[in-house]
Image (cartoon, helix red, strand yellow):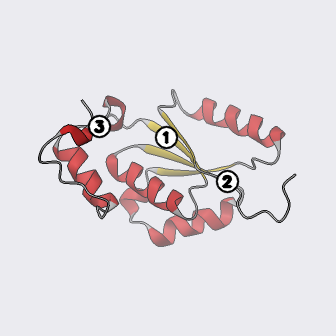
Amino acid sequence: MGLSNSKSFPLTKKSTPQDVLNYLTNEQKFAPYVKTGGTAIVTGGNSGIGVHTVEYLAKAGMNVVLCTRNVDTTEKNVKSQWSSNIQKMVHVQHLDLADLDTVRQTAKDILQKYDRIDCIVNNAGIMALPERR
């Protein structure tokens, strides 16, 4: 049964991420791995919608591996923008998607640190390129 099948479905296009988190928590709609501290990997989690994705996965109880090209800047941002409860759930990992050697190394590093990966959010991307190549 999908979320929107309920006649009293409270979420709308104006719902905030906190509204969604509250609804999923109250209705016990999370996958089992969320409640047990599963692991999520998020690329592009240091800006835009990725920041909110990382934040709310952590608030839901997941360990979040935030993959980024600039580890130092991202770690500073994590410390300055989120509470200590969220900070302890977010682990910054170097990843440069333009370099396949670092992609392979990052995959090895993550698999060594975590027993399993429950969720991958491929959020990193490039837009507004001057030429398509």
Which numbered marker is on residue 125? 2
**Where's the N terminus, which quadrant?**
top left
Badge 1 marks a residue whose secondary structure is strand
Q: CA distance from mark 2 to mark 3?
A: 27 Å
Q: Quick check: 92 left or right of 107?
A: left
Q: Position of residue 118 (x, y in %)?
A: 47, 31
Residue at the image position 58 percent from the left and 61 percent from the top: 46
Q: Position of residue 65 (x, y in %)?
A: 55, 46
Q: Position of residue 63 (x, y in %)?
A: 45, 43
User: What's the residue type where badge 1 is placed?
Assistant: Ala
Which numbered marker is on residue 30? 3
Q: Tell me which label, 1 or 3, sits earlier in the chain.
A: 3
Q: Tell me which label, 1 or 2, sits earlier in the chain.
A: 1
Residue at the image position 41 percent from the left and 35 percent from the top: 38
Q: CA distance from mark 1 to mark 3?
A: 14 Å
Residue at the image position 59 percent from the left and 63 percent from the top: 75
Residues 35 and 20: in front is: 20
Badge 3 marks a residue whose secondary structure is loop
